Amino acid sequence: MNGDRHLRLKFHPDRVPEGDDAALMQEVARSFGRSLGGVPGLRRMTGNVVHLELGPSLFPVAWAAEGITAAFTLASRGDALIIDLRANTGGDPETVALVCGHLLDEATHLNTMHDRGGEASRQFWSPTHVPGRRFGGTKPVYVLTSGKTFSGAEELAYDLQQLGRATVVGERTGGGAHPRRGFTVHPHLEATIPTARAVNPVSGTNWELVGVTPDIAVPAADALDRAHREALAELDRRGGDPPALAEVRAARSGSA
């Protein structure tokens, strides 16, 4: 009723443990293993375009770093990258920063979180060093979004878009830019309370309520095919070594 999409009273069928964020961490632990550590999909598409799915959330960086590092080490050999966030509902801003570190060539200010009291703030920067191989800051990157993309996943799309590092393809996202904490108020009820707000250093604002507006608006179900076509067209424009360019042009001809 107040419009903040992080303010909720959530019912949990299983008993919620006591403690702040206990219900959230219980859910996170259950989904982490089932999603291959937050990287449920990685494949090479025609034209040496890599499709990388991150979800169902951007798990805490201490958990997710290994899988993300492995995925980007493989993806770094691609000529273009499609990051799929269509089913990603949020996560850790530290993990957002780690992903951005693989896509940028130097430390970059991504976001600042201001707490509710207005006296404290915390900046998030992409790391100077990342484990494994970087995809780097020059090859084409596309980010897929849907109406389900939310919170930390929105931050990843928004940060890369504001930096001009990625093209966002898909649907407008859910519009939740306020980090929250969860409090157990009953054995099966959790109150989630917004505790801060994000401010992007480029735009000076965030995606709260309005969502992330895609650069190329298409239904979520069509976003991967559209991003693949855009990537092939961009690689064709850039040229490259003859065998790679031949595959790109053959793929473009087949997808026309």
Image: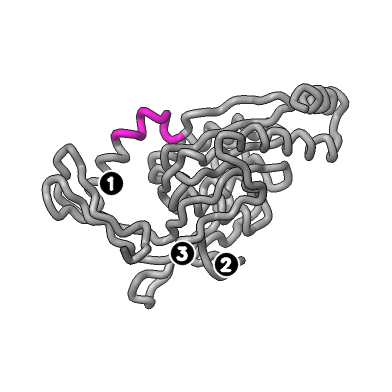
For residue 238, above or below residue 211: above
Which stretch is magenta?
30-38
* In this rendering, position of residue 115 left or right of residue 184: right
How much space separates mark 1 and mark 3, taking CA atoms? 20 Å
Q: Amino acid at mark 2?
A: Pro
For the N terminus, the quadrant is bottom left
Q: Residue at x 42, y 66 (%)?
A: 197
Give me the disc on residue 198: 3
Identify the secondary structure beneath mark 2: loop
Tell which circle, 2 or 1, labels the residue nearer the N-terminal end. 1
Question: Is 150 left, or right, of 106 in this rendering?
Answer: left
Q: Residues within 10 Å of mark 3 (few under 14, many from 20)?
A: many
Q: Helix, strand, or loop for circle 1? A: helix
Q: Nearer the viewer, residue 4 or 158?
A: 4
Task: Residue 182 in the image: state x and y as whole percent.
Answer: 25, 54
The residue under label 2 is: 201
> x%, y% of residue 40?
47, 29
Of labels 1 and 3, earlier in sequence is 1
Which disc number belongs to residue 24? 1
> Residue 59 appears at what percent x and percent y?
40, 42
Residue at 35 percent across and 29 percent down: it is 33
> Quick check: 245 above or below 223?
above
Report the number of numbered marks. Answer: 3
Residue sticking out furthest to the bottom: 119
Mark 1 is surrounded, within 10 Å at the Cα level, by few (under 14), some (14 to 19) or many (20 or more) other residues, namely some
Secondary structure found at label 3 = strand
